[in-house]
Image (cartoon, rainbow, N blue to C red):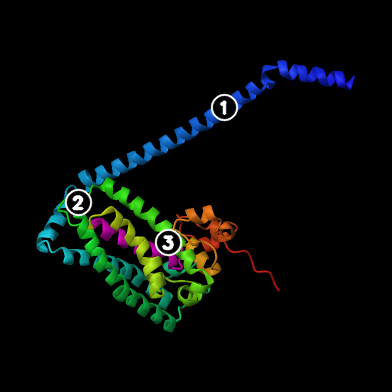
Amino acid sequence: MKDGAGQDMAQRMETDPGHSPTAKLQKQGKKLSDALRISAYVFSTGLLMFTALVNASSWLMQNITLGNFWQTAWLEFYDYMEGDEWTIFLIGAALVPALAFWGFNGILLVADITGKPTFITRYRIQLGKNDPVDRKKLWKAIYTALGNQFFVSFPMLVAMFYIMQWWENTFSKELPTFQWFLVELSIFTVIEEILFYYTHRLVHHPVLYKHIHKKHHEWTAPIGVVSIYAHPIEHIVSNTLPVMTGPMIMGSHIVSVSAWFSIALVTTSISHCGYHLPLLPSPEFHDFHHLKFNQCYGVLGVLDFLHGTDKMFRQSKAFERHKVLLSLTPLSESIPEPPKKEE
């Protein structure tokens, strides 16, 4: 009887359209079609929103708030410099980014040395560290950072100048549109993420780490100026080339280069500053790298996710705090570290 019942069931499944192989394929095809339709809807909606945002921002920048201000200012500056491309490049690619770096870090150094204002120091990530900072260690970091800027970055900028001249666009009298600058900024960021992630992992190889990268990791609780406290080889390969490569590939305008270099130096200072300040990008990701050494190698975290080099970070309280702080309550208070187990 069991055999007869099984045969009847098999016959019903064969004759039932819902159980036939064709029906199963149709169901799978429908699921795939639905998934593709939803994906296309989400992607197209996101693309439309992004395009609208870019266009609105561009229109606002160029027609309401600033008009032709930047174009006029650039032409006046260009004429004042009498079209001297080397001087213009030196100011845009070296002086302006350096002022952005030291201006931002100057504020942080006051907090690091004096412990004031408390509006900054209360947002310290690693509580009890650099409070106050070791001054002997700090001066060593400052001297090294200045040495890297003058004796490593500057010669690289000389080579970059001739590459940018070859493009014949870097010193154009017409500024790029705001939309194009945003496109360039996106490309620069992706290139930096790729180059920095893999060169950073490279210098973590035991052979290279001992002789090169260990210097940077003397600071397990970093401060802003430590962002360029590194061995000269590391400063070339991991700090400078990932930032310079994008503009050299794109043949970007000097104004775009100046803005990108300044943004890159300020953001890496934020990543190293040791303070999770309101409204600024979260430094938790790279601070965790200095704390644990073998996690969070990248800038954006995309390649860390793909390579699984952020697993420990994602299981930590630091990951919960890895967001833009939109209140005045320090995240170290609202999302504190669990109490240490007594040995």
Indicate the secondary structure of the residue bearing disc 1. helix
**To which quarter of the image does residue 48 belong?**
top left
Which residue sits at x=10%, y=62%?
80
Q: Is residue 59 magenta?
A: no
- Image x and y of residue 173, in percent: 14, 53
Considering every residue shown, the one lying at the far right of the view is 1
* Residue closer to the observer: 99 or 67: 99
Q: Is residue 226 above or below residue 181?
A: below
Which residue bears the numbered disc 1?
29
Residue 255: percent from left, percent from top: 23, 57
The residues colored magenta run 255-277
Say whether marks 3 and 1 touch (CB < 8 Å): no
**What amino acid does circle 3 point to?**
Phe
Q: Earlier in the sequence, mark 3 or mark 1?
A: 1
Return the x and y of residue 99 as percentages of the image width and height.
28, 68
Residue 89, image x, y percentages: 21, 64
Relative horizontal placement of residue 66, taking residue 13 as reference (left or right): left
Q: Say what secondary structure mark 2 lies in.
A: loop
Q: Which residue is mark 3?
A: 196
| Residue position marked by numbered label 2 in the rendering | 175
Q: Residue furthest top?
A: 15
